[in-house]
Amino acid sequence: MLIRLRVLAESVNSQDRTFQARSQVVEVSEDDLQNIARDLEAGAVTRFYRGGEPHGRVLAARATGDTLWLKGRIRPGDGDSWRLLETGAINTVEIQTLQRGVDVFLKSVAATYPSLPL
């Protein structure tokens, strides 16, 4: 299963290199969303490409009803990723559920998914 969260542009904070992402997730039960939030909050790393090196980490995550929210941080030595996030080129966080845990990917999917729900 793949879940897409929209990066909230107003949450991008250059002081501590953090950002937030949120979206409604209607195809997943509330219990499953709670489990996904726990897996995210357990320190899931963020990557650009499947199997690529980590670019950051999830700091916090919450599931409320049918909405999933997370706060992430880009690591200090990763200037390229941070610039892409700051400029809006990265506008989506993809979460892929696994048998154990989750994978988190930073993406630019505006052309493919222009209307992600908040």
Image (cartoon, helix red, strand yellow):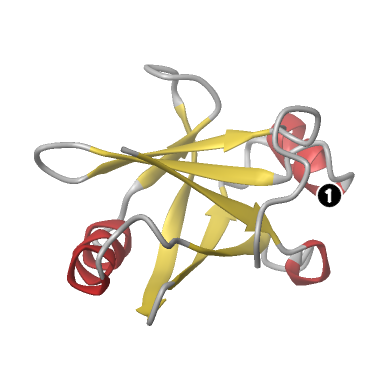
Q: Is residue 12 above or below residue 57?
A: below
Q: Measuring 42% from the left and 62% from the top, which residue is drawn there?
A: 26
Provide residue 60's location: percent of width, then percent of height: 41, 71
Q: Position of residue 84 (x, y in %)?
A: 80, 36
Displayed quadrant of residue 59: bottom left
State which quarter of the image contains the N terminus. top left
Residue at the image position 65 percent from the left and 35 percent from the top: 78
Q: Is residue 117 left or right of residue 97?
A: right
Which amino acid does the dot numbered 1 rest on?
Glu
The single residue placed furthest to the left in the displayed view is 99
Of 94 and 47, the residue lying toward us: 94
Q: Residue furthest bottom?
A: 64
Answer left or right for 78 relative to 28: right
Residue 48 on image: x %, y %: 55, 27
Query: Residue sitting at 64 percent across and 44 percent down?
Result: 92
Quick one: 72 or 31, which is closer to the camera? 31
Q: Which quadrant would the C terminus be assigned to in this image?
A: bottom right
**Total marks in image:** 1
User: How packed is label 1: few (under 14 Cα within 10 Å), some, or many (20 or more)?
Assistant: some
Label 1, on which residue? Answer: 86
Determine which quarter of the picture holds residue 52.
top left
State the residue at coordinates (72%, 28%).
Answer: 112
Q: Which residue is the extreme one toward the right? A: 87
Using the image, determine if residue 44 lies above or below residue 31: above
Q: Is residue 58 left or right of residue 11?
A: left
* Element carrying mark 1: helix
Tell me: residue 34, above or below residue 92.
below
